[in-house]
Image (cartoon, helix red, strand yellow):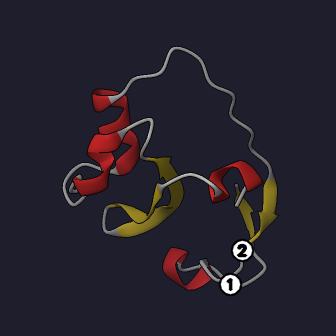
Amino acid sequence: IPALLLCMVQRHVRALHLADRRPYQFEDRYIVLETVPAAKDADFTDTGPNEWLVETAPFTHAEFTFHADSAGAESELLNVEKGAPVFV
């Protein structure tokens, strides 16, 4: 967790995304409630956190970083071997 988030009220959301009933993405997200207060009570059952945020609180600029890593604790959820390469 980035140090900046530690001092903010946030909601931690984890979501497993499926396609044809098979896992393809594990989303692990922190939402700062000062920025998006409605996220506190949002139900992400039918609409995932990313889609909900884009619809509810679209942003005008952002920076995204991706890298390869080894699957850890989430490997069982994704149905891959621990240590398998994953996109983070």
Q: Dot 2 corresponds to which residue?
A: 71
Q: Which residue is mark 1?
A: 81
Q: Looking at this view, name the residue that lies furthest to the front.
A: 7
Task: Answer left or right for 87 relative to 57.
Answer: right
Question: What kind of element bears circle 1?
Answer: loop
Q: Position of residue 53 (x, y in %)?
A: 36, 37
Q: Amino acid at mark 2?
A: Ala
Q: Residue at x 39, y 69 (%)?
A: 22
Q: Which of pointers 1 and 2 lies earlier in the amino acid sequence?
A: 2
Residue drawn 48% across the image and 55% down it: 10
Q: Using the image as rendered, state which of residue 55 and residue 82 is in the foreground.
A: 55
In front here: 72 or 37? Answer: 37
**Of labels 1 and 2, the one closer to you:** 2
Label 2: which secondary element: loop
36 left or right, relative to 84: left
Q: Looking at the picture, how far across and down is residue 69, in whole percent?
A: 80, 63
**Res. 52 mark:** none
